[in-house]
Image (cartoon, coloured by chain):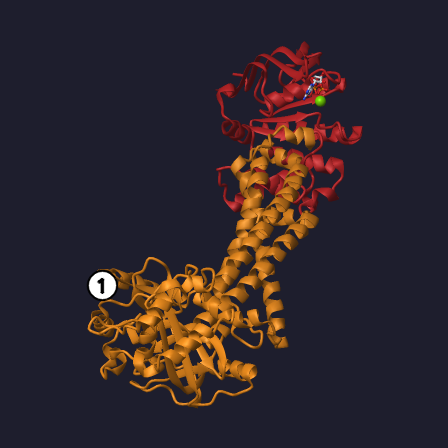
Chain colours: A red, B orange
Amino acid sequence: MPIITLTNISKTYPMGKVSVEALKGISLEISRGDFVAVAGPSGSGKTTIMNIIGLIDKPTDGKVIIGDKDVSVLSRNGLTKLRHEKLGIIFQSFNLLPVLNVFENVEFPLLIGKDRTPRKERREWVSYLLDEVGLSDRKFHKPSELSGGQQQRVAVARALAARPDVVIADEPTANLDSETGEQILELMKTINREQHTTFIFSTHDERIREMSDHVVFLKDGSIVSELKAKKGVTV
Amino acid sequence: MILIMALRNLVRNLRNTIIILTLIMLIIAVFFMGNSVITESGRRLMNSYTESFTGDIVIKARSQSSISLFGPNTPAIGEFIPIPVIEQYNEILSLMEQDRRVEALSSQVSGAAVMDINGRRYNVPLFGVDARTYFQLFNDIEVREGQILIPGQRGAMISAGRALLIERETGKKPVIGTPLLFSTMGHSGFKIRELPLVCIYSYKNSTPVMDEIILTDPQTLRALNSIMLASDSDYTPPKEATDLLTGNLDSLFGIEKSTDEIIENGSFSLLDDLTRQFSLDDIETSDEKNPDWNGGSWNFILLKIKEGVSSKALIKDLNIRLAPYSAEAVDWRQAAGKSALLVLLLKAAFNGGLILVGVAGIIAVTNILLISIFRRTGEIGTMRALGTTSLYIFSLIFIENMVLSFTAGLLGIGTGTIIINALNKMELPVANQLLRSMLGQEYFHIEASISVFLISLAVSVFLGFFSSIYPVHCAIKVEPAAAINKG
Ligand SMILES: Nc1ncnc2c1ncn2[C@@H]1O[C@H](COP(=O)(O)OP(=O)(O)O)[C@@H](O)[C@H]1O
Ligand SMILES: [Mg+2]
């Protein structure tokens, strides 16, 4: 069963008298554990579709199913809860909380939910994640003291903290130089392989198809083509 | 975590924090100092009034209009309103004497008269007191010259303050034995009595209002007031006199005027004439000649209550028990009448003004907070996108503002306390008459009060609360999408 199913999603932004059709009836299935790239030129609707999958925005029409839940019936609080339990989000501009240090930023998603993991276990898990992203020696730094690449690594760790089913990242490398961007993608891929977490990320870099299990090509709000690699074949 | 974040947010937005802190701090400092002064003067006023002339509780006849120990509080112009006497005085007295909550009591007749001394005239309030108990009840009364009234003795006692005033205005110091002439004019006619000055006294904590009081024996005052027992045969003045008085008193002076005004306007001739016309002996009533003068009527019973007894509770209880006697119990403040209202009025005026300042403060703080929320929209959106509930955002912003206003409150109280202590140390003389009568002290000295402290703190938290409502409302409406648009 796919972990995410989009059926006939469309999104129209009202712009005064005219309206912009950002998505035009998109249907898509995402399998558990896949490393999924949404590729397309600027303005093709990548951000719009990522926001809809990330429950940050609502489609004008169509159905979004996450796990086995139809999200259209959920309240504002229900959406928040589902976002917290099932999704991890990585932002284009990192969005770390400026008053928290690196460790606290990663710990944050674990402190806001109902789930009360014991403190010791929680700290070990956060330390493990920081180790994974290679920032063990920056635990007590403030975000403002880190480089962009380091900040995005913290964001990756934070997205993983609450053990989500799916991590969603809209152009996570857009604000990084290409070398650092590649390192971030490598990191995500490693975690995808080790922890079997589903990753969906958008990019306008066509080269990304080589490392992905599933690539969705968008143009003008429609899927122009889809590429699915057989599991284990691509790397 | 929320608390840590709240504190760090406050530190991070240091400029806003300091502006809000200062604003609330100033308001609270002013509130704290003002109310400390007012509370202190209230306390001093209460102490000096209850120890000097009101007692803790006063029992009086139930009346339509409000009546204090000085008489009706709002006399109609040109109309004489008699102070009602306590109807079943003896029954009530024995009730009170048996009440274990009552420490001591005394009785009083009140009135007002014109006093002639050394060729000068003064409008004076008269307290006809029960000499057997009055001076035990009010041990703040200190004899300067002469001797206090003894039971059955006729005479008048004036305050040292008034003696000084008389000396200043007439050039002659009143001496013990000087005859004082008291006259009244009511609807039952004109009365005049002469009393020897028996005592010049002072109150431990005097105020100008208290210096006005003249203490006399009760029977003379009853005669001046025309209060008589049913058994007493009332005095009927000769026909010429009644014609003169009841016929056309008002028209004599052209317009309706109160007795006070007539006298102040210097139209003495009528009184002088009447004084000449009737010898004093002529108009003495049987009440005054009656050796058992304690049987006379009284206007008030003054109570001092035992320590630890709640005055409020006792008044409530007494009012239930006194209802069948058509009498009522009132507190010292009501008994003192207008003179005790000054502090309350001042308090109302001061805090009324501060409410306006407070509202302005709330608007200012609301604006600053709104700007700060607007600047943090992206951050709030990020938290929402990470799965924090609106309740979490609500708590975060709310805790921030509560910590801020609470701290500002403490700082304001601290500042106020420092200023008050500095003023106390300077031993400033209180020069202003009004202030002096309010504070009841010659040197500025204010003691901090727990209740003012707590109220000030509560006010600061209220300020913080009210200025948070709208900004918090805006903060919880921030959508996760703000993380992307504003992040
Ligand atoms: N908030 C919005 N209001 C109006 N139009 C929008 C809004 N967001 C996106 N669009 C439009 O929708 C289309 C798709 O945008 P977007 O999803 O941001 O594309 P991409 O992320 O691929 O660059 C574009 O034409 C864009 O101008
Ligand atoms: Mg985009």
Between residue A75 and residue B460, name the one nearer to us: B460
Q: Is B166 rendered above or below residue A50? A: below
Between residue A169 and residue B381, name the one nearer to us: B381
Left or right, residue B336 beside residue B377: left
Residue B452 place in picture, x, y as percent: 50, 62
Left or right, residue B330 beside residue B434: left
- Which residue, given by chain and number where applicable, does mark 1 sit on? B325
Residue B297 place in picture, x, y as percent: 26, 72
Q: On the image, which quarter does residue A9 sit in?
A: top right
Subunit of mark 1? Answer: B
Q: Amino acid at mark 1?
A: Tyr
Q: Is B76 rendered above or below residue B366? A: below
Left or right, residue B248 beside residue B87: right
Residue B280 place in picture, x, y as percent: 34, 82
Q: On the image, which quarter does residue B286 sit in?
A: bottom left
Between residue B321 and residue A9, name the one nearer to us: B321
Q: On the image, which quarter does residue B482 sit in?
A: top right
Image quarter for ligand 1: top right
Secondary structure state at the residue bearing disc 1 = helix
Which image quarter holds the C terminus of chain A?
top right
Count of numbered circles on the image: 1
Q: Residue furthest front?
A: B240
Residue A65 place in picture, x, y as percent: 53, 18
Mark 1 within 8 Å of ligand 1, using the beta carbon:
no
Residue B169 in view, yes or no:
yes
Residue B447 in view, yes or no:
no
Left or right, residue B311 beside residue A60: left
Residue in the image at 62% along x and 39% along y: A106
Q: Is B436 rendered above or below residue B329? A: below
The crowding category of the residue bearing disc 1, from other C-alpha atoms within 10 Å (few below 14, some 14 to 19, many at least 20), is some
Residue in the image at 54% along x and 47% along y: B465
